[in-house]
Image (cartoon, helix red, strand yellow):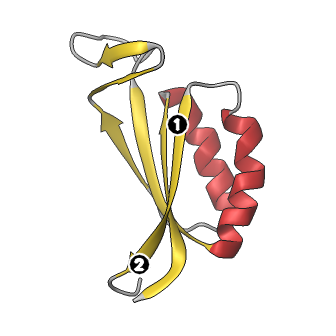
Amino acid sequence: MDMTHWRLELIVEPPVIKPIESVLTQCGVSGWTVLPALSGSGHNGAWSRKGQIIDVSQRHILVTILTHDQWSAVKTALAPVIEDNIAFASLSPAALAFKD
């Protein structure tokens, strides 16, 4: 298995998704997935989508697989996009089971 890739997961507020997708595109990333987060808890306490009409306290999860070079570029370009927003980022080594 090829261990030269990274899995990046971001949990962010919906308005930040489009700017993040722009960063990924500019850095040569060709694929990612955005999922709705249903509920959770963080240092600001618990939150949930249940009963919400607007997306003010909703979160989305963006997942992508990056090469080492892509990660270096994404990390630099992404910092100013998420620094003033509620965001959580996780990076872990990724073994690709199948080639794209």
Disc 2 from disc 1: Cα separation: 22 Å
Residue drawn at the location 41% of the way across and 35% of the way down: 60
Residue drawn at the location 50% of the way across and 27% of the way down: 13
Residue 35 place in picture, x, y as percent = 34, 43
Q: Judging from the image, what secondary structure is the residue with disc 2 in?
A: strand
Residue 99 place in picture, x, y as percent = 40, 87
Residue drawn at the location 33% of the way across and 16% of the way down: 47
As drawn, the residue found furthest toward the left would be 50
Write down the quadrant of residue 54 in the picture: top left
Residue drawn at the location 40% of the way across and 13% of the way down: 45
Q: Earlier in the sequence, mark 2 or mark 1?
A: 1
Q: Which residue is mark 1?
A: 88
Question: In the rendered image of this protein, does residue 19 appear above or below residue 75?
Answer: above
Q: Residues within 10 Å of mark 1 (few under 14, many from 20)?
A: few
Q: Which residue is mark 2?
A: 95
As drawn, the residue found furthest toward the front would be 43
Foreground pick, 45 / 69:
45
Which quarter of the figure is the N terminus placed in?
bottom left
Q: Residues within 10 Å of mark 2 (few under 14, many from 20)?
A: some
Identify the mark at residue 47; answer none if there is no mark: none
Question: In the rendered image of this protein, does residue 15 appear above or below residue 80?
Answer: above
> Residue 45 vs residue 7: left or right?
left
